[in-house]
Image (cartoon, rainbow, N blue to C red):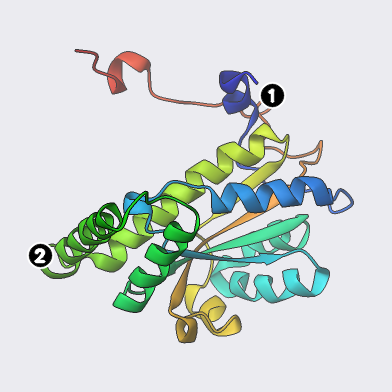
Amino acid sequence: MDIIKTLNWRYSTKSFDANKKISSSDFAKIKEILRMSPSSTNLQPWHFVIAETEEGKKRMAKGTQGFFIFNEAKVLNASHVVLFCSRITADEEYMQKLLESEDKDGRYPNDEIKQNVNGGRNVFADIHKYDLKDLQHWMEKQVYLNIGNFLLGVATLGIDACPMEGIDIKVLDEEFGLREKGFTAITAISIGYRTESDFNTTDKTPKSRLPEDEIITVL
């Protein structure tokens, strides 16, 4: 895989071919890309609602009405739409759940290391909860790490994507009962395959990035 070629191939797709669907084998890989994203202290403070049926996409499109109507077609015509959600808080119950899941997966050779990891993770969470007072924002940052990982990951599969912050968070939280489950929506990403008429393809709208010498300092 040529990572630079992949980076130049992908772009924010504006027009999806409603007749092209992601295969079941690629969909399985997509779910693993979501699961395997890195996060600070392995906190994994996320949940994903994935619309793959027409009914599911119609429900997701409820978040693109009114001011956000410009994103409706991107939801309805995509093969799948992933709603990225962040935890609202990380309480002791969740921290213990994480710890036991890691233990089950064989991450800890002994109990001392297990408890040290647990203590360290809680220290970082407490810094953000009590000192910086930005615990939810910190968790949202981890979700954005996942989003970046996801955009590159699906591109390696030859799948197009369009991240959309232009969605009605409150509507989608209510539609999927997210707040009652301890989550809130952050961003939706439509995935599928571009149409030939998409105005944003890189041959029609070339990529533009600031020059290397302006954004990178090598010491």
Furthest residue toward front: 110
* Above or below 52: residue 106: above
Residue 206 visible in image = no
Label 1: element kind: loop
Viewer-proximal residue among 7 and 118: 118
Residue appearing at x 43%, y 56% in the figure = 143
Residue 33 visible in image = yes
Residue 147 x %, y %: 50, 49
Q: Is residue 132 left or right of residue 200?
A: left
Label 2: element kind: helix
Furthest residue toward left: 131
Q: Which residue is mark 1?
A: 203
* Above or below 75: residue 195: above
- Image quarter hosting the C terminus: top left
* Above or below 210: residue 154: below
Residue appearing at x 65%, y 41% in the figure = 154
Residue appearing at x 62%, y 20% in the figure = 5
Viewer-proximal residue among 38 and 95: 95
Q: Amino acid at mark 1?
A: Asp
Mark sitting earlier along the chain (2/1): 2
Q: Measure the alpha-carbon separation of dots 2 and 1.
A: 48 Å
Residue 106 x %, y %: 46, 52
Q: Which residue is mark 2?
A: 131
Q: Is residue 139 left or right of residue 78?
A: left
**Corner quadrant of residue 155:** top right
How many numbered tags mark residues here? Answer: 2
